[in-house]
Image (spheres, rainbow, N blue to C red):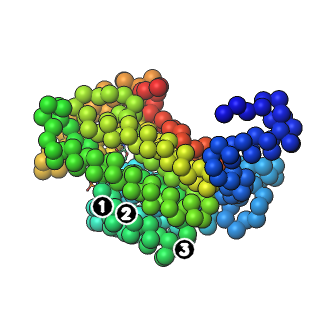
Amino acid sequence: MMLPCSAALTDSGVALVIDQVQAFLGRPLRPNLRAARRAGGGSHPGGGTVSILSDPQADPSDAFRLTGRVAVVTGAAGGIGREAARLFARAGADVVIADRDEAQLEVTGKEVTAAAPQARVLVVPTDVSQKREVDRLAERALSELSRLDVWANVAGILRHGAMIDTTEDDLAAVVGVNLKGVYWGTAAAGRIMMAAGRGSIVNIASAGGDMPTPNISVYGLTKAAVIHLTKTAAMEFGASGVRVNAVAPGFIDTPMVAVHWTDDSGHTDVEKRRSMLELRAAQAPLGVTGEPADIAYAMLYLASDASRFMTGQVMRPNGGVVMP
Ligand code: NAP
């Protein structure tokens, strides 16, 4: 399709370009774009049509607030998910926390309430590898908290092993959580958010999705797939005002990586932990490993209006360990 570059500088030129794009897409563009601007983050819910970003009197930190919004976080019993749930609630959101680890999910619920007493917290034990359970999670968020603004797909698992030793069970388990879980979550959130004309989906990928790494082949391919599905969803959902982005963390000290220094009885080998963290830190230009908060703040940016012009992108809080 050829677009007239010089004409695009005038109002009639803009109209011509929009007409051509609509003809190319076979659907109207302008109403959707208006909806996208309204909801993708133009204004806070119920806050009228003035964009917080274009208000010269506004406190810049208000663009990061989630007041009046509802955020779903999967994997919320774990390191990064728990921190994200706490941070979203501290930023003003009501949160729906989901995980298959029910006992630790209850702990997260208490921590969220302690950090943000005003937040409503809905605890929904969920196996994200099961489409029916993910759809039910979305339905409960909507029916019990009345809206859905943010959906963070954080749940994930890691299995180590050489490619030549990988079993069908290894492959099915990791694909089931890391790929199908994110896929079903993105679809369930997209269905509701597109109808509402607003929303932000944040998928957790990994530096391993950019960087082929021996002995975690299945994990790496699922994380590369998360980056790809994030971009595809951004294409499908954008015209309805729904943004989809990914965060690809570097090494973060959480229960997932503690397998490196924890034995079967749960005992931590302190020396092993120290040397592993030192090794990982030395691989990054910043010379440090990360904490869950480093990822949660990137997620807050993508969840909030501060990133209203971003979709289909990957943020990489990773100490510089990979720069694709
Ligand atoms: P984590 O502490 O192990 O948290 C992951 C949580 O997801 C756990 O509570 C886990 O429960 C849960 N989960 C696993 N399978 C599930 C399922 N089928 N349904 C619902 N929940 C399920 O690990 P994390 O480090 O916070 O990881 C969070 C995300 O960051 C993951 O997607 C991970 O791949 C990604 N990531 C982590 C790092 C890192 O260095 N830590 C780096 C890059 C990316 P169980 O404990 O029962 O498995």
Please give left or right for residue 123 compared with residue 216 in the image: right
- Does ligand 1 reach within 8 Å of label 1's beta carbon? yes
Check disc 1 and report its element: helix, strand or loop.
loop
Residue tagged by mark 3? Answer: 146
Give the percent coordinates (x, y) of residue 257. 28, 41
Give the percent coordinates (x, y) of residue 26. 63, 49
Q: Report the amino acid beneath label 3.
A: Ser
> In the rendered image of this protein, does residue 324 appear above or below residue 202?
above
State if disc 1 and disc 3 touch (CB < 8 Å): no
- Depth check: 172 or 54 in front? 172
Q: Report the amino acid beneath label 1.
A: Gln
Residue tagged by mark 2? Answer: 134
> In the rendered image of this protein, does residue 107 appear above or below residue 257?
below
Q: Residues within 10 Å of mark 1 (few under 14, many from 20)?
A: some
> In the rendered image of this protein, does residue 150 appear above or below residue 298?
below
Residue tagged by mark 1? Answer: 130
Q: Residues within 10 Å of mark 2 (few under 14, many from 20)?
A: many
Residue at 30 percent across and 51 percent down: it is 177
Please give left or right for residue 18 compared with residue 238 in the image: right
Nearest to the eye among marks 3 and 1: give it.
1
Say which quarter of the image contains residue 221. top left
Check disc 2 and report its element: helix, strand or loop.
helix
